[in-house]
Image (cartoon, helix red, strand yellow):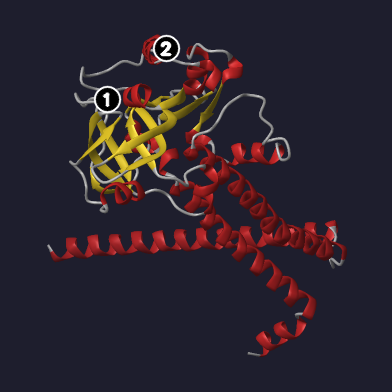
Amino acid sequence: MKKLKGFTEKITRKQIILSIVVAISLFLFLVVQILSLHLKNSLSTQQMAKRWDSSGKSAQVSCFISENAQITTQQLTNLEHAVDAALIEISISKEKESERLWVDAYSARGELTVESGKTSVTSTAIGVGGDFFLFHPLKLVSGSYFSDEDLMKDYIILDEDGAWQLFGSSDVAGMQVVIKGVPHIVRGVVERGSGRMNDKAGNDKVTFYVSYDSLSKYGTSKGINAYEIVMPNPISGFALTTIKEKIGIDELSFQVVENSKRYSMFSLLKVLSEYGIRSMNHKAIVYPYWENIARGYEDILATLLLLKFIFLLIPAIILFAYIIYRYRHRTWNMKTLLVLGMEWKEKLVLKYQNSDKIKIKGSFHTKRKKIKNFLKNKVDK
């Protein structure tokens, strides 16, 4: 108790304040770290590689295309063949015929007028192809998704607002709407994202999801503006480089992002290094709302990374200052350290010598006892 009292009496007010500062900094670092992890894992559009391949050997790559490129579905089919060829080149092939080595999707933004028996709504439409809803698992309120594997292409998915405006209900899967005189079946109803980030990203209006074919025929669109793929990534950057090289359009007409690593520490440091010039874009690319949200998260996570560095730097500086202080006010020198080292060495030598003596003594007594027992047995016989 006396020792404890003596110890506490030696602690100065300055040391207490600095200890509190260190504790608060480490606590804030932990809070920011938890928040960062939550944000990284909250965007389902950036997690497709994990959902597709839990081993971590695949990468998700997104390609955003300018309106001027006028890319066609045939060009995307050629890109798919090029991906197959690139994988065969590095000896990656299907083990089973039914196996899929990669999965992809594409989309275009436009506008549609959708009619029901009650009314009509003209609003944003996204024409989709491939496995779009694997990459964008929007929360279903009712019904289901559609894909390229469906024989019928005249399906539509409404968001909740659109369903209420057209039918006065969100439970409308299986009902019929008309687009330019052509009947379409409501396949499902989805929840639209809400909040400031969604609104600013361009997801603030009623949105219809139809096949790319339907949007091209019955709506207005400026062509395919997003292509997404998850594919094997045996070495870092392989998937990204493959798509960049094989897409077959002018470099100024597209931008490629590797979603799988966009929130890594090095990627976020790059975002910080581009502060002030990041928003400058000389490419005529209009990002879809999900990419705008993902880019917004990049800015937030980069800021949080900077805060984490600051919260770790504060205790590091205090610790460094304490070490310098202790060194300058040391009561020892190299000579005392050498003497202390020699004393420890002598103690260790004595300790091992004593332990060896005990072992030898123990083994001598054991042998002596065994001999006595042997002679006693002989006499008894």
For image coordinates 84% across by 56% down, the residue present is 334
**Which amino acid lies under the numbered mark 1 shown in the image of this protein?**
Asp
Judge by depth and name the residue closer to the eye, 116 or 175.
116
Judge the density around disc 2: few (<14), some (14-19), many (≥20) Cα neighbours within 10 Å: some
Among the two numbered marks 1 and 2 on one chain, the one whose residue lies closer to the N terminus: 2
Residue most extreme to the bottom: 2
Judge the density around disc 1: few (<14), some (14-19), many (≥20) Cα neighbours within 10 Å: some
For image coordinates 22% across by 51% down, the residue present is 171
Horizontally, residue 145 falls left or right of residue 368, namely: left
- Disc 2 designates what residue? 75
> What element does badge 2 sit on?
helix
Horizontally, residue 138 falls left or right of residue 361, namely: left
For image coordinates 71% across by 82% down, the residue present is 7
Asked if residue 53 shows in the view, the reply is no
- Disc 1 designates what residue? 148
Judge by depth and name the residue closer to the eye, 269 or 8.
269
> Residue 332 in the image: x percent, y percent?
83, 64
